[in-house]
Amino acid sequence: MKTNEDRLVKVSVLGEVSSPVMRYPYRISVKGEPMVLPGVGGIRYNVRVGDPAVGWMADHVEPGVSIKVSDVNANMALNILSCIGNEAIVVSGDAKGSKGVVTGKHGGIEHVIVDFTPDVLDKLVIGDKVLVKAYGVGLKILNLPEVRVMNIDPKLLKLMDLKIVEGFLEVPVTHLVPASIMGSGLGAVQTYSGDYDIQLFDEETVKKYHLEDLRLGDLVAIMNAEHTYGRIYRSGAVSIGVVVHTDCVMAGHGPGVTTIMTSGSGKIKPRIDPEANIAKLLNLRDDI
């Protein structure tokens, strides 16, 4: 596999550890229940990439640390230019100098999600500044142009055990996900930031595709989905993404997926591998 990594630009972007936000206490579940649950933002001390994406008493919780900035244009740059696998460095506060890794992007709230080890999490506070060495925008697989790559550090791409076989890119994934159950985020006009959600409300589909054991950080293949210029349904297309936040109780929502590659012509061939999780690939934890 040949890429244009030597032509990419590495650039700094800056975010701040964000506060959790709540507009109203209740989230209304698909069963009509008003529920009060932790949501987006802040520092999660006991939820990291590699942990289950399903079953928490939570809604849209992002593993590790969420960062953003108040300036809309600067935050767009943070979200577009940051890529999964990028190095992140704390540049203020008691944890200054500590390093982490970008593990996802969450649309709507427009957060970049960063993993740090537990000892660093204990030192961080809301408002601490985190610099991301953004690297990966513009990455291409030169000998398979039918596959569009996005949101991924070249280092992570190399660690994924990708293989070109008979004109197809074989990609290890933990799960296949039918495009028919994809929800919030569908129809976005670009996929260089944000995510879209796997709805888990149909028990038969969840059982058929074994989605009850999704983990944060899992690589998944969304079948019949194209993300070249936005998120659409297209027969035969395949898109690969990383699970970036937990499941949700609200209609149309579920574990979020940030896209890392797509092929509208179906030139991606998923290969099931239970170990295909970025926490393992990037050696972020010793316990998985």
Image (cartoon, rainbow, N blue to C red):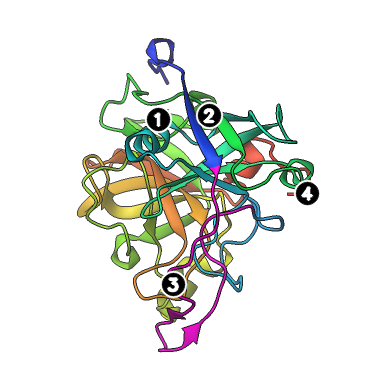
Nearest the viewer among 42 and 181 is 42
Q: Amino acid at mark 3?
A: Leu
User: What span is colored magenta in the figure?
Assistant: 17-43
Residue 79, position in %: x, y?
40, 38
Q: Which mark is residue 287?
A: 4
Left or right of 136 on screen, residue 39: right
Decide which of 213, 185 is in the foreground and name it.
185
Is the residue 287 above or below the residue 167 in the image? below
Q: Quadrant of residue 185?
A: bottom left
Earlier residue among tags 3 and 4: 3
The residue positioned 49% from the left and 74% from the top of the image is 207
- 28 falls in the magenta region: yes
Amino acid type at image mark 4: Asp
Q: CA distance from mark 2 to mark 1?
A: 9 Å
Residue designated by label 2: 132
Mark 2 against mark 3, which lies toward the viewer? 2
Residue 282 picture location, percent across and down: 63, 35
Q: Which mark is drawn over residue 81?
A: 1
Q: Mark 4 or mark 2, which is nearer the start of the sequence? A: 2
Q: State the SS at label 3.
A: loop
Helix, strand or loop at mark 1: helix
